[in-house]
Image: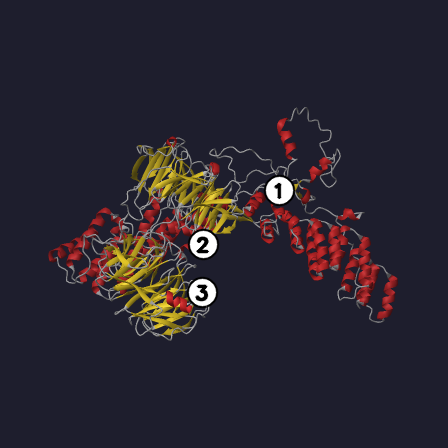
Amino acid sequence: MLVKFENKSHRVKGLAFHPRRPWVLASLHNGVIELWDYRMDTKIDEFCEHEGPVRGVDFHSSRPLFVSGGDDYKIKVWNYQLKRCLFTLNGHLDYIRTVQFHKNYPWILSASDDQTIRMWNWQSRSCLIVLTGHNHYVMSAQFHPTKDLVLSASLDQTARVWDISGLRKKTVSPMTPVDSGVGNDMFGVSDVGVKHVLEGHSRGVNWASFHPSMPYIATAADDREVKLWRMNDDKAWEVDTMRGHINNVSCVLFHPKKDLIISNSEDKSIRVWDMNKESAPQVLRRENDRYWILAVHPTLNLIGAGHDSGMMVFKLERERPAYDCSPSHKRMYYFNDNYIFEHVFRTHSTGEVSTQIFRRNSRINEKPRTLLYNYSNRQQHCVLLLFEPLGTYELHVTDKKRGGDFSRQATYKGFAKSAAFVSRNRFVVLDKNRAVWQRDLKNEVKKKIAIPGMVVNHIFPAGLGRILLRTSDAMVLYDIQAMKVVGELRIQSRHPIKYVVWSAKHKFVAMFSKSNIHIAKANLDECCFTFENSRIKSGAWDEETFVYNTATHIKYLLPNGDKGIIRTIEDPVYICQISPNSTEVHFMNREKKCGVAKIDPTEYAYKVAVTKCKYKTVVRIMRSGKLVGKSIIAYLQKKGFPEVALHFVKDEKIKFQLALQCGNIISAKESAEKMEKIDPKSGKACWEKLGVEALRQGVVHIVEEAYMKTSNFDRLSFLYTITGNTTNLKKMLGIASKFRRDKNAIVSQFHNTLYLGDIEQRVECLKKAGMKKLAYVTAVAHGLQASADAIAKELKEDVPEIPDLSKAKLFKPPVPVLRAKKKEEYNWPLVEVSSGYFDGIDISKIDLNAPDPEKSDQYEDEEDDFLEEDTKDDLGGWGIQEEEEKKKKGADPLDDDNMWGGGDDAGLGDLDLGDLGDLGEEEKADDNAEDGFFVFPSAGKSWDTKWSESSNLAGDLAAAGQFDMALHSLNRQIGAVNFESLETRLIDVHNMAHASLPMMIGMPSLTVPLQRLDADDNSIGLPRLCYDMSHCTSMLQQAYKLVSAGNFPKALELFRETLAIIPVLEIANQEDDAKQRELKLICKEYITGLRLEAARRATKDPAKESAFAAYFSRCRMQAIHQVRALLNAVKIAFKLKNYKATAGFCRRILELCVSGDKAQLAKIVKPAQIRALLKKTEGMNTDAVPVDYREGETLVLDCKSLQPLARGSQPSKCPYCFSTYKAPGSVCVTCGIAKIGADITPYRPQGKWKK
């Protein structure tokens, strides 16, 4: 049984599946109806209007309705979209047991304890007819799936089949409306008659069900039997009786797709019966809950069961077929109906390759989970079948040359958790002890493959001589010939990898679990990772594209992380292979039938072409018009190829943005001009953006035009100033003084006089602004006496006093950056924008048959000797160098006035270099390289990325800034769930792993990674961590001093702070691991002891006080602290007259005085006094007050309650600090970090321990 969903609630009495959505409706004994999404494990809604238990519910087949019936004698029809009850049908006089919608007609069928069955028209809200005949409670009633029949079951020990064809003809005839008043003849049975009465049970019948397609009926009764009946038009007779339940059988159903009968009982079990008697019954039990109701999904292989404490949705077996296919072989092998078949994709032909395999008395779900085929063996069919629940495998070997003769088929069996073929005649198995063994085709062990340093959970095929190992937190590629690890990929997910799919030539590998996909290269260097909300079913490679599917969609994933949806699918399928032309997907469905689905690969083929710079393919796909424009344009923008999108965009606004993004000023200007005509307001905004970009590139004439279009006169004046265009600057002065009437005109005029150095105009400007005094001073200062006298006459007596001008300096106009004589010479290249492949090319005239100047494959691992050596493509890119155009014209690309300079003075001149000889092939190769397209080198990995990929230590991950991964790693390695105390430590590690070097003013600081040196080869490696063992040791010494001084609260805080630092320390070897373990034990003992002392001081019960003191003395501490604890325990026990306990404490003190530091202990204890006390208490040897403590017995404390655990009980431990507890699940009180009883995988450095 595979449980898909389980929910805890009150007793579930009714269940119903939605026909299309992943919903299940449950009616509870407390009167609540709950609607659940069983796929997402989420409650959608609940409905509470019934009074008392609700025993029956059902969904309508096409409308958003469901019906319910309960112990309040009411039938309610609900609309789950409106979330309310639409109406109530009244008429029954007792509890309503079941309700059901008719599949085609507007009818509702109900069964009640009033011994009647009623049919209702829910559209007219009236009762059509009442069926009487049973003389006890009617426990269930249902419509036949296709015929005009009704089946009922009653406690009168009978089940009845009713013929309702007359009622259908009367109420649903072409001439009669559906809601005609038929309900007037309430108890008339002329329209409905009893066709069959099924008698055979010795006690009341609780349930009866029709078979969905065959003339069978199943009944369940209180006599603990399930009976199978067959019927025809004349009679019904008993076929079989199934016994096995030991209590009342409450419900029975037929499986919708298989010849199975499913029943549940109050004996707390569900039984699955084979109608053909080929398999033994399967029993599914619960410990404490009785089953009451069953429901099957109308189309899917899902079963719902309601019991005393809730419900569950489950499958009887896995529906995924056992198959194996290789991307390099055009065939597939799969298991079906006890045979192994071969399917050829090209011809769509299928044939057997084995004889019948299984015995007929096998269990119902005893089918292989995995099938592996050995494609390396050309002479034999070698098939491995793995039965994971049983932990067994079967090897079947048949000669290929024998055709259909399988008489000499060899079969071998053994025990294994997983297996994989590694050569023509070898395979490896993983046994239950996690050991890997290599065997031959006769199932004989050849050798044991030792894999040190890791616990293997599963093995996957990885080609010849290699296997892929799954550990608790990584996937490891292992070479069994070289006996070494080839690659390793850390998997940060709670879902383990279930399936592995290799591409052709083993170039890429896709590893996916329930919801995650990892794409990696052949050496397990990760390319990308993606998460899916829906369960991932299967996948296959189409060259370098991984095509996979969920239950509803076929999707694709590229190695660079791009993904998308190809198409939707109606039913779940399992992808086997992609056709060579990439237009078909070969799949297998859950019925083990092979099929083909059409797909359109245009989208992912386009993305691959863009990524690999296949220009002709890009143009060809864009011309086809199959792609949605905006999504493709957005993709090109995201990937940094706006110049490509620019040639295919129709919208001028988008085209303008793309032109600016790729720096194409000419195209941006054309779009701005068109936008200005369409919408002047948007056009002005475009010209403003164009001016900024043109100025950035130094295209001055475009900047000038943009400023004119936007009337930005001030910026235009400044532009003329820095370019030395005094002619236009004088025009701007005239415009400002004569034509402009805005409030900034006078300011603009004054700025222009400053830019030109025109004093006379400046004086006139000041006079015009009303600043005559300032105009007078300006005229005098610059020697314009005539203007000064004229102004003085106007000022009369208010002439300002002239300051001392002896030290005054003339304010000269700014010197232009570049003074050009022609308009074309105004431009200067602030930013050089290289031309692209599509620049200046008419796309309609491109020869699509010519080969693409592709760049080399960015995913190819050249150092991997596992791959075949691919031919090297010419390096290409989106840009063409300007020097190339000059070469075509016959000019020297370095002969340019804007470069370092021309002539002999700029070159090497007359320098005699001697005979350089033949420059050889390298120079020719360099010359030829210039004929291609320039490719910017790809950015390397940052140090943070290298750190996170090279280590899974929490400190290293935090230093790299991967805090999520660090927290996940801590959860996996030490069971951490409370990260409050660790947060500060992780941030400190990150901040102190980088040094910040200040640069010049206005520039950001340079961040430099700080790395620790490897002890073996002094090579730079992982980050330098700010905490180390010496830091913890220092804190420990401070805590010891605080304990000696009696400052317990601060000491407790310091010990816990030490525990919070240890998880981020480096573990380089076994010695480091042992030291950290010892440190954690010390902190744990002291924290427990100090908590015991605090509890002792807080209690007022003398017995508890003595017990806490005794527990404290048992903590493993330094000798001086333990002696202090023992002295305290001696005082308390002696006061209580517990002489026997006192004697035990005295003996331990004397033992410590002998083994410890005598000089230090002599300061706090006198051995002679202790001996005297021991002698005195040994003579009495009694305890006056009973204390829960026995000297000499093993003491295991529950660190939460600080009470000893019962002897013989198995304590739960904190996986981090090793504190003991009575029960698991909560956060450890000692460290406050880890979850008690959590399963962990302790950290191990990648590779072996360093000695």
The reply, left or right, for residue 230 in relation to residue 177 is: left
- Per the image, the residue denoted by label 1 is 615
**Mark whose residue sits in front, 1 or 3:** 3
| Amino acid of disc 3 | Arg
Quadrant of res 1206: bottom left
Q: Mark 2 and mark 3: span between their CA atoms?
A: 27 Å
Q: Secondary structure at mark 3?
A: loop
Q: Secondary structure at mark 1?
A: helix
For the residues labelled 1 and 3, say whether their Cβ atoms are less than 8 Å apart: no
Q: Is residue 804 above or below residue 1239?
A: below
For the residues labelled 2 and 1, say whether their Cβ atoms are less than 8 Å apart: no
Q: Mark 2 and mark 1: span between their CA atoms?
A: 35 Å
Q: Earlier in the sequence, mark 1 or mark 3?
A: 3
- Per the image, the residue denoted by label 2 is 533
Q: Secondary structure at mark 2?
A: loop
Provide residue 51's location: percent of width, then percent of height.
34, 73
| Amino acid of disc 1 | Tyr
Q: Residue furthest right?
A: 786
Q: Residue furthest bottom?
A: 184
**In the foreground, 665 or 193:** 193
- Count how many numbered circles sit on residues in the image: 3
Provide residue 424's location: percent of width, then percent of height.
39, 32
| Amino acid of disc 2 | Asn
Quadrant of res 482: top left
Q: Earlier in the sequence, mark 2 or mark 3?
A: 3
- Per the image, the residue denoted by label 3 is 63
